[in-house]
Amino acid sequence: MPARGWLDREMDMLASCLARGFAAPFAVFLLALALALPARAGDIASRRILGFSPDGTRFAFEEYGIQDGSGFPYANIYVVDTVRNRWIDGTPFRVLLQDERASLEEARRRAASRAARLLHRLQITPRGETLAQNPVTELSADPHSVTVAVRPGYPTDASLTFTLTEFPLASRRCARYTDQPTRGYRLYIAEGQGRRRLLHADKRIPKSRGCPLNYAISDILHYRPSGNRSVYVVIISVFRVGFEGPDRRFIAAGYRLRR
């Protein structure tokens, strides 16, 4: 489905129906998600890791859920170039079934069918391991900083710390739909006790991200191809303006360890 279609419909519906905005510290927001009445809940997407290519330069995952407001099921499959930190040409594969009677399983099946040829060509299969997870219901963990072992079996002093910071980043497009301030993010890494280095810094908010209000580290994944450097992928939760409350979607950033 073309990007303009699905996003413009969602944002136009939001502009006409959104009755109140969102502004709260991240921890308060998570608590609200856990305790809010269903009518106030946003669309909290789920994700499934599909895996890496044999050389680790490609990574894929699925995002899926039921769109708030419309009740339409959706499924998106992202294929990420872990070297350049961008989507592979021709992706993501997006499916939105504009029928509230349609099933989520059908949306996921259609997305999988569309992505099957590319995933097969890239030989993407479940590889590697999850080093850390921070589900949306977790209230005690720091959503902006995660320290992990370099890989399973390594001593704990061989560590990596991923740190995410947020900052105000205006979007004229989003200003048409909400008066809430939109935000960008920076992602840093530090090896052991070394100085942290910048992996990513937003310069603008891409249209595909919607109107982001907050970010959180969701997962840290690791894969070490035979004879090559370790590859790490950070999956980031993006909490954006939604129809009935903040919606969660996902983005991913890759990093290759130099050692």
Image (cartoon, rainbow, N blue to C red):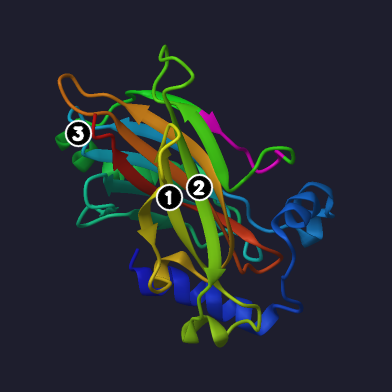
Marked residue nearer the N-terminal end (3 or 2): 3
State the separation of the CA atoms marked 1 and 2: 5 Å
First in sequence: mark 1 vs mark 2: 2
Q: Is residue 188 left or right of residue 83?
A: right
Q: Amino acid at mark 1?
A: Tyr
Vertical side of 170 occupied by 199: above or below: above
| Amino acid of disc 3 | His
- Whether residues under marks 1 and 2 lie with C-beta atoms below 8 angstroms apart, the answer is yes
Q: Nearer the viewer, mark 3 or mark 1?
A: 1
Q: Residue at x 44, y 14 (%)?
A: 155
Residue highlighted by disc 3: 120
Residue 178 is situated, as x and y percent measured from the top left of the image, at 63, 81
Q: What crowding class fits label 1: few (fewer than 14 Cα within 10 Å), some (14-19), or many (20 or more)? A: some
* Residue at (67, 38) in percent of width and height: 141
The answer to if 156 sits in the magenta stretch is: no
Question: Quick check: marks 3 and 1 in contact, CB under 8 Å?
Answer: no
